[in-house]
Image (cartoon, rainbow, N blue to C red):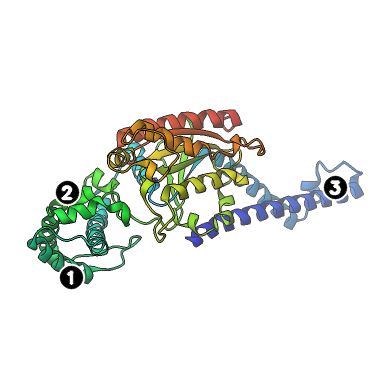
Amino acid sequence: ADDGFRDKATCLAIRRELFRAKQWYQRRVRANLRERSGSHFGVGSNMCFDSCIASPEESAQKAKSSEIDKMIVSERKTEEKIVKLLLLGSSESGKSTFIKQLRIIYGAGFDENDRVEFVAVIRSNLLQATKSILAAMTILYIEFDTQEAAGESKKMIQLLNDGAAEMAGVEGIQISADNLGAVSKSIQTLWQDEGFKQCFRRSKEYQLIDSAKYYLDKAAEILSPDFHPSEQDILRSRTITTSVVEHMLDQDIRRLKYQVIDVSGQPHRNGRRNKWMFCFDDVECIIFFASLSDYDLKVEGSETKNRMQESLDLFETILRLPWFKRKTTILFLNKTDLFAEKIQHSNIVDHFPEYKGEPGNVEQGKKFILSMYEKRNPQLSPHVNYNNFIFSHYTCATDTHNIKLVFRAVLDIVHRTVCFTGVLL
């Protein structure tokens, strides 16, 4: 991940140094021109100097400098018409899914080659979810309800261990085509077992991908030899983002080009964000993703740290970074669908004692979580002179219609901002 950030920082540093060197060179050339012009024609009489006195080498240098000037002006005009939106947030908050939605809404979507590539990813997600549940059953001392399921679990564990492998961009599992039928039968048997389902319902006690239930319900289809993933299958797939992903919208919107930049969630946890965040000081808007359903989950690798607490801390830290003090900030409280299901059996007050709403009340729960993020805005502090404008939306990144409506509102906010700052002038 560091290489991506280092490349971005290096490019910016090189551009600044080239610009400074060019300015210095132009000052030296002008000084020499004035000096030589003054000695031959009098001070200020350098109008015909270029053609009368300049040596062939100097003329070539000036022509090259003029060409560089034109390139810089052209690049600057292009850059001024590109509005950059920076996606931030903890891991698994929905940033990558959002970019997939933009490909569907403003691009060509996913062609046949893309879908073929996602077959391996989706199958890996299904197998990894099954493996996580089976491992948790041992840790949580949950027994299988039937002997058939217990027997299939042993076969499944052997097949999963044999198929464990590293896939591109995802810590995944590969199963040979010859074993697809056996794996499909085992997973379907396990998913019908009450002990297996009980362990699934206790998923807040271990790490399990959000799309586990969706893929387990479709296990037979996913593991069939002729599986052809739908857009929803692709949107729910999980891969690990390990670098900066830049996505340019295929359509110009109101005479502007939009570039969406996804920063992986992992660097937020190692304390080094301040070393590379300055690379994105030219973005027009920050979109921060927070998962509503994280309120009862633990950070991976920690027994005590709450995921939502981590997200809140990250949100406040980003708002306080000097490069983002004047940026428009949009908060996406994501995964409303998972939150609505989870709050019916997992009370917010068990994890955030200050919650005063009714157990199971979706709207009160959403408003409470929104208030926690709003309180982290440094603008509310009388001792800090910040000017953060924060807009919030409740989103479901896997719902194309919802994202289309929300992003339209985002573009309206951003367009007004760039008009105010003079980008379109």
Q: Nearer the viewer, residue 138 or 318?
A: 138
Is residue 149 placed above or below 259 in the rendered structure?
below
Amino acid type at circle 2 is: Asp
Which residue sits at x=42%, y=58%? 242
Could you tell which of marks 2 and 3 lies nearer the N-terminus?
A: 3
Could you tell which of marks 1 and 3 lies nearer the N-terminus?
A: 3
Amino acid type at circle 1 is: Gln
Does residue 262 appear in this view?
no
Residue bearing mark 3: 34
Residue 138 x, y percent position in the rendering? 23, 64
- Alpha-carbon neighbours of circle 3 within 10 Å: few (<14), some, or many (≥20)? some
Kindly state the secondary structure of the residue where label 2 is placed.
helix
Disc 1 to disc 3: CB gap under 8 Å: no
- Alpha-carbon neighbours of circle 2 within 10 Å: few (<14), some, or many (≥20)? some
Judged by depth in the image, the label closer to the viewer, 1 or 3, is 1
Q: Left of 379 or right of it: where is 255?
A: left
Residue bearing mark 2: 217
Amino acid type at circle 3 is: Arg
Is residue 156 placed above or below 84 in the rendered structure?
below
* Distance in Å between CA atoms under marks 2 and 3: 80 Å
- Alpha-carbon neighbours of circle 1 within 10 Å: few (<14), some, or many (≥20)? few
Label at residue 158: 1
Q: Nearer the viewer, residue 8 or 313?
A: 313
Does residue 364 appear in this view?
yes
Q: Left of 2 or right of it: where is 291?
A: left
Residue 103 x, y percent position in the rendering? 35, 42
Q: Can you name the residue that lies furthest to the left here?
A: 148
Q: Left of 111 or right of it: where is 291?
A: right
